[in-house]
Image (cartoon, rainbow, N blue to C red):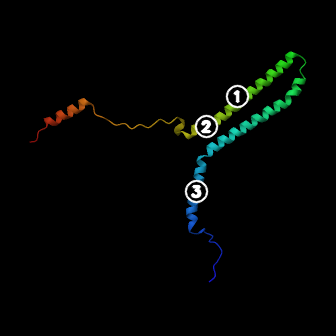
Amino acid sequence: MRMDSRTDPSGGPFQGMLNAAYDQFATAGRAFEPWFKAAARGNLEAFALVTRRAQAYVELPARLGRCRSAQDLLEEQTRFWQTMMEQYAECSQKILQAWADVAKASSKSGQASKPQRDYMMVPEGDEKQEEAAERSERRAA
């Protein structure tokens, strides 16, 4: 008897099971997609900030070389530090906005979810007395 070494093109008996498992993996991956996008946006913003700051540091000696007085030097240093603070603030705002969008999307209806409460109606003491009085007034005929 000769055995055929070719595989079944339909995937055999396990194909349906494997497809279901891989579909679940894909669904789980899509659930984390906003998190991955926010992390990528944050990394992109951080990289852009590092690039801008590196460029500013490279340009600094040329700018300082053009200074002719102490006042010019002070103005150039002030401009450098102000620009740095503006860029850091802008970058941190963009990163926080990316994560705020994720947090907003993950909560239902865009608001913080309120804890669900289970309310149980307990009759007051006066109601119990009224019910007892009604029962005692009814007489069987």
Q: Residue at label 2?
A: 101
Left or right of 90? Residue 30 is left
Residue 80 placed where, x, y %?
A: 80, 25
Report the number of discs.
3
Kindly identify the residue that appears in the image at 71 percent across and 30 percent down.
90
Q: Nearer the viewer, residue 84 or 130?
A: 84
> Which is closer to the viewer, label 1 or label 2?
1
Work out whether mark 3 precedes mark 1 in sequence or the reverse, and give the earlier one.
3
Residue 13 placed where, x, y %?
A: 56, 68
Q: Amino acid at mark 2?
A: Asp
Q: Is disc 2 placed on a helix, strand or loop?
A: helix
Q: Amino acid at mark 3?
A: Asp
Q: Is disc 1 placed on a helix, strand or loop?
A: helix
Quarter occupied by residue 68: top right
Residue 89, numbered circle? 1
Kindly identify the residue that appears in the image at 64 percent across and 34 percent down.
97
